[in-house]
Amino acid sequence: MPVEKYRKKPVVVEAIQWNIDEKTMEEVSKFMNKTRIELSFGKLWIDTLEGKMFADIGDWIIKGIKNEFYPCKPDVFEKTYEKVEE
């Protein structure tokens, strides 16, 4: 079977950037609608569909198409997503 090329379907997601301050923690908690998260040594641990993952300061937290949450590194986020103007 030959290798073929595929383009990612355009999907709009919601995301918030993680920073370690009280306001951001409150916003992340509200955004994630009380999904199980833990804060440990500046890392935000998130229960994802693939298991527990962590977000470093500056990472993005993305809400997926199944209402799941997962972290994304800033450089990957910048290459993959662009802001939607409403």
Image (tube, rainbow, N blue to C red):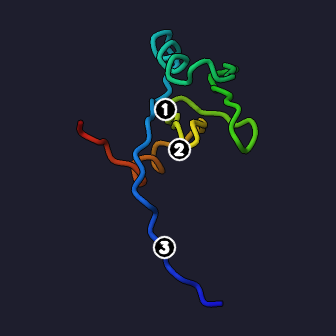
Where's the N terminus, which quadrant?
A: bottom right
Disc nearest the viewer among 1 and 3: 3
Q: Earlier in the sequence, mark 2 or mark 3?
A: 3
Q: Earlier in the sequence, mark 1 or mark 3?
A: 3
Find numbered disc 1 in the image and state the secondary structure of the residue it sits on: loop
Q: Is residue 57 left or right of residue 10?
A: right
Mark 3: give few (<14), some (14-19) or many (20+) Cα within 10 Å.
few
* In the depicted structure, whether residue 2 falls above or below residue 31: below
The residues bearing labels 1 and 2 have C-alpha atoms spaced at a distance of 22 Å
Q: Amino acid at mark 2?
A: Ile
What residue is at 60 percent from the left and 33 percent from the top? 55
**In which image quadrant can residue 13 be found?**
top left
Mark 2: give few (<14), some (14-19) or many (20+) Cα within 10 Å.
few
Tell me where residue 41 appears, x and y as whole percent: 68, 21
Residue pointed to by mark 1: 58
- Disc number at residue 65? 2
Where's the C terminus, which quadrant?
A: top left
Residue pointed to by mark 3: 6
What residue is at 69 percent from the left and 22 percent from the top? 36
Q: Earlier in the sequence, mark 1 or mark 2?
A: 1
Find numbered disc 3 in the image and state the secondary structure of the residue it sits on: loop
